[in-house]
Amino acid sequence: MEHEHSNNLIHETSPYLLQHAYNPVNWHAWNKDSLDLAQKMELPILLSIGYSACHWCHVMEHESFEDEETASLMNEHFVCIKVDREERPDLDKIYQLAHHFLTQRPGGWPLTVVISPDTHAPFFAGTYFPKNPRYGMPSFREVLERITDYFRSHRDELVGQTSAFRDAFTRIEPAGAADISSTILEQAAGELSDSFDSVHGGFGAAPKFPHPTTLELCLRHWAHHREAEKSQPRSRHMALHTLDAMARGGLFDQLGGGFYRYSVDAEWSIPHFEKMLYDNAQLLPLYTNAWQACGDDFFSETAKSTARWATAQMQAPSGGYYSSLDADSEGEEGKFYVWSTEEIKSLLNGAEYTAVEARFGLNGTPNFEGKWHLNIKEPIETVVQRCSCDTEQALSLLSSATKKLFDRRVNRTRPQRDEKILTSWNALMIKGMAHAGRILGQKEFVSSAEHALDFVRRILWRNGRLLATAREDRAHLNAYLDDYVFLIDGIIELNQSRWRAAEMEFAITLANTVLEQFEDDDLGGLYFTSNDHEVLLHRPKPTADDATPSGNGIAARVLLRLGHLLGEARYLDTAERILRLLSPAVSRQPSAHGSVVIAMEEYLFPPSIIILRCDPDKNQEWTRPLLKQYAPRTMIMTIPSDEEDLPGILNNFKPTQDVTAYICQGVSCSPPIHRIEEFIDRVKELNNFV
């Protein structure tokens, strides 16, 4: 039943917008009615963009949006619009850029922008503003009063700002194609080497983010040179040292699994405690790859723990994955996750506490606001020594102790979970789960990915088009480039785990829609929004990676892979046009464009495609030895012998014995192979495996 004091957000699907549905601010969602209202009333639009797990968004809501006096000022002088940046990344990209143009500083959330009611061009931008003057900032009410005065006295001048912004946006978009050179691959590796923190891992100084695409780029650089019999151990070391440090440190939840958003320090010790689906979705396959690259079970166990956290905490009964867990609980950041020494001692026996104290370094001053956030500080040998026991006993003590801590933590007040289901983030996790499940032999992870893909096809696929978001099976909003190309990537990975003809047809349909709805037929490259999307102030082409990979980078790679797999020239041509268009921008800073650089690598050095025609239960003997080796440009598709009418050139690969293998690279394919020894030798030679 609706509350009598709810505002217009009460009917939205976003938990973030619903959090603001009972504010005294007369919030509106971004839609035609709201924009028309601002124009009719001749009031500026106060646009506030944030997301559910954002700590400072909560602070600003409590200080200002729940304050009657501030709300009254907002309602009188503005049409106030709330946007969930996770549901509307199109708006967020535009107005974050506008913030940078206006302030010459990076943006963030909450993003506070005031825009013209007529043209929607911004004339003021900031992020968080306090209720009262502090941190060197004016109060939010002072800001509102100044903006109101400015709008009244300068409205005529605002008309010209629209064309100025359009010109500024145009100048930053890629224009002018160039050749694709392998020197970009080496340049990217060099830049990463220069910024690498050789002590703590990661790149640059605090705060430190995981940057999964950057780490993938390092591993691939090593693997590429291994194939060419040229050693590049530093690239491998940068990736493995960073992944090890993140998983042993405070960025990883040592009790419940899963990674937090970022580390506030250079040592990966104390995180910002929100957990995002997209970070974990990208780190899951990366830790799986790290295990392949070095054989250390610490990496495979980290991957498994991350996947189990995701299935237990983030997967809805209907199949889709939820978006995030808040950093705060009971109004305090990290309260759910941290411990007092006294509480730990009260739960454990003497031997267990000794083991935990040694493993997590619980001595001296607690590391987070008078309490402990658990980091692995010492190797198991230190626990053995401190407990005067053998390794098996030490591991048993740690297992029983951490289970007791976890069981106690379960009963605490949990952080809020954002239960909207985003197509693009689900696609990333579908890929991660399928990859980890296939490589590590965990069928339940593959099943989890299947359930999520089934949800997307059932709920988020309507009338031949994707929708961007759903909550409680209510889906809406036109999907973006990321939704389409991330999902194609996930389907390709899932079909390497097991073949589903209908899913491959779905991937082809998605790819065709990308070409029809997102491609710039004149210059090349793909827009973030479709041809029939709402017309906004700007239509960007994503180039650099952000917290998620560049849509153009992933698009180029999946179109190359589909093009080679199916023999479809249209896909290969579009991928080449994307990469040629982006080449000048990427060459200026390749390390910031990891996903595009990876696609360039696959353009220059086409993937090896292995087709096995056999009953699914017979492929393990042939593929299992290969899955223990890191080969990022090798695809393995096992297609049942009785499958007919396959798409594209796949139909040429006929089963002629119980197991028939074909190995293709670029446009060249081997004759059918029937002996497992010959098959494994050919693949090992291709990838220079040991």
Image (spheres, rainbow, N blue to C red):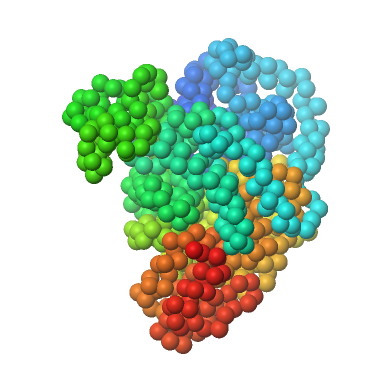
Residue drawn where x is 60% and y is 34% of the image: 204
Which residue appears farthest toward the left when viewing the image?
349
Considering depth in this image, is 89 or 363 the residue closer to the camera? 363
Vertical relation: 303 (above or below) 324: below
Q: In this figure, what is the number of numbered marks?
A: 0
Left or right: 333 in relation to 135: left
Determine which quarter of the picture holds residue 46. Answer: top right
Residue 500 coordinates in the image, percent (x, y): 44, 70
Residue 411 coordinates in the image, percent (x, y): 25, 33
Residue 118 coordinates in the image, percent (x, y): 72, 35
Determine which quarter of the picture holds residue 74. Answer: top right
Left or right: 132 in relation to 303: right
Which residue appears farthest toward the bottom when viewing the image?
656
Which residue appears farthest toward the top when viewing the image?
133
Residue 78 shows up from this direction = yes
Residue 381 coordinates in the image, percent (x, y): 32, 38
Q: Quadrant of the N terminus?
A: top left
Vertical relation: 508 (above or below) 578: below
Residue drawn where x is 35% and y is 59% of the image: 442
Vertical relation: 313 (above or below) 432: above
Residue drawn where x is 45% and y is 42% of the image: 244
Residue drawn where x is 74% and y is 58% of the image: 180
Left or right: 654 in relation to 450: right
Residue 115 shows up from this direction = no
Considering depth in this image, is 617 or 650 the residue closer to the camera? 617
